[in-house]
Amino acid sequence: MRVSVIGTGYLGAVHAACMAELGHEVLATDVDVARLESLSVGRAPFYEEGLPELLDRGLTTGRLRFTPSIREVGEFAEVHFICVGTPQQPDSGAADIRHIRSVVRELTPHLRTGCVVAGKSTVPVGTAARIKHEIAENIDPGTEFAVAWNPEFLREGFAVRDTLRPDRVVIGVETLEAADKLRAVYAPLLGETDLIVTDLATAELAKVAANSFLATKISFINAMAEICEVVGADVHSVADCLGRDSRIGRSFLSAGLGFGGGCLSKDIRAFATAAEELGAGRSLRFLREVDAINLRCRDRTVDLARRLVGGSFTGRNIAVLGATFKPNTDDVRDSPALEVAASVQSEGASVRLHDPRGIDNAREVYPALNYVHEVGKACEGADLTLHLTDWDDYHDIDPASLGSVTRCMSVLDARNSLDAPRWREAGWTVRVLGA
C-alpha cells in the first residue's frame, strides 16, 4: 500500500522505516527540513537499536522516501499516519494538540478520495472526532475520507521490535472500509499478533490507560519502598512476593528512581486533566498521587546520597553513572538521573557524569555538569558513586578495579539492579532505595 507518515520524530521515524520493512511504499514528511535531509541519507536523529539498518534497507529498495511537501504526501497515500508530538501545555497538565491540528489543516486540501487519516499520537479522548469534523468542514465537496485512531505502544530502546512484533494492534474506526485498509497495512503481522478493532474513543483511551496503569504500578512499588525504609523491610523481596501472584506479575515492580521520558509523566497529567474537563476528575484523582510519588523518588535519592557523604555535598566528589531516563536510548527528557545529578551539583558537589549514549543530549539541557566518556574517569577520586540509569554497561563493571580509583568505595544503587553481593565482596558499601 501507499502510506504516509507525518512527523519524523521518535515515533514517526520508526513507524516509517518499519512500514517500508513490511513492504509498503512510504513517503514521510516533517517541518524540520534538516531532519528530513538526515533521514534521507540513512542517519537517524536519535539512538534506537535496529533503526539505521531499517532506514538503509528502505532507502536502498526505494520503498522509503522523505519530502518536505505536504501536498506530495496528500496526493501520494491511501493511509496517512499522523505521528506528531502532543507535549504538555506549559500552563497546565493538559495535552497540547496544536501540532495535530496544524497537520490536519495543511493536509486536508490535498487528500485523495477514499483515504484514511489515522492518528498514532497520544491524545485526549474526543480528538479523533474533532479531527473528523475539521476535515469535513474544509475538504473539497465529494471527497470521501475516514478518520481512524491507531495508538502506538512503543518502548524506547525496543521501538523497532515493538512495531514489527507488537503485543497487539489497536485500530479505532467508524467504517468497515477504514478497518479493511488498516487491516491491510498490518496484514504481514497479523499471523502472530492480535488485531483489536474498536471505536475511536476506545482506541484513544487504550493508550493513556496503558501508560497510566504502568505508571501506577511503578509508583506503587516505590511507595512500598518508602515504607520499607521506615520499618527496615526489603522492597525487592516484597516485589518478588507480589510478582509471584499471577494476578499481579513481576514486571514494572522494580523499586528505584522512578520513571521519566517524554511519555508517562505528561500522559498521566493530561489524562487526569482531561477527566476533570469531562466532569469525571474524581475517577483519576489517584494519578496526581502517582505523579507525586514518582517525583518524590528523585528527592529521596538526593537525600540518601547527602546522608551517605556526611550530611553535605560541599567539597565532595560525586560520580554519576547514567544521564538518560532509561537504558538503550539517548533520550534525556524528564530524566530522573539528570535531575538528581544537577541537584547534587547545585548543593556544592563536584559531579562527573558518564553515560554510554546520552552525553550530547544531556549537555544541551545541563551544560554546567562535567561529562566524561569513561566510567573510570567519572569515579576517579569519588566520595560516592550514584548508579542512576540501568545500562548493561554498568552491570559489566569490575567493582574491584573501579574501587581502586575512588576515594571512598560507596555506591548508591538507585535502580536496585547492580549485583550487590559481588560489589560488597569487592569491598564496596552498597545502598539501595527501599532497603
Image: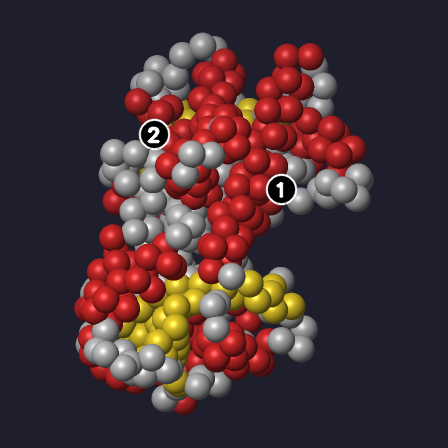
Marks 1,2: beta carbons within 8 A? no
Distance in Å between CA atoms under marks 1 and 2: 26 Å
The image shows a total of numbered marks equal to: 2
Q: Residue at x 60, y 76 (%)?
A: 189
Q: Residue at x 62, y 62 (%)?
A: 167
Residue for badge 2: 342
Q: Residue at x 57, y 42 (%)?
A: 214
> Is 37 placed left or right of 423 in the picture?
left
> Is 415 placed left or right of 122 in the picture?
right
Residue 39 point in image, percent of width and height:
31, 72
Tell me, what colour scheme is on the image?
Answer: secondary structure
Residue 264 point in image, percent of width and height:
46, 43
Residue for badge 1: 252
If the image is split into quadrants, where does the N terminus sit?
Answer: bottom left
Q: Residue at x 53, y 41 (%)?
A: 212
Residue 61 point in image, percent of width and height:
40, 89
Examine the image and state in which quarter residue 63 appears.
Answer: bottom left
Q: Amino acid at mark 2?
A: Ala
Compared with 283, 371 (above or below) is below
Compared with 75, 330 (above or below) is above
> What is the crowding at mark 2: few (fewer than 14 residues within 10 Å), some, or many (at least 20)?
some
The image's mark for residue 9 is: none
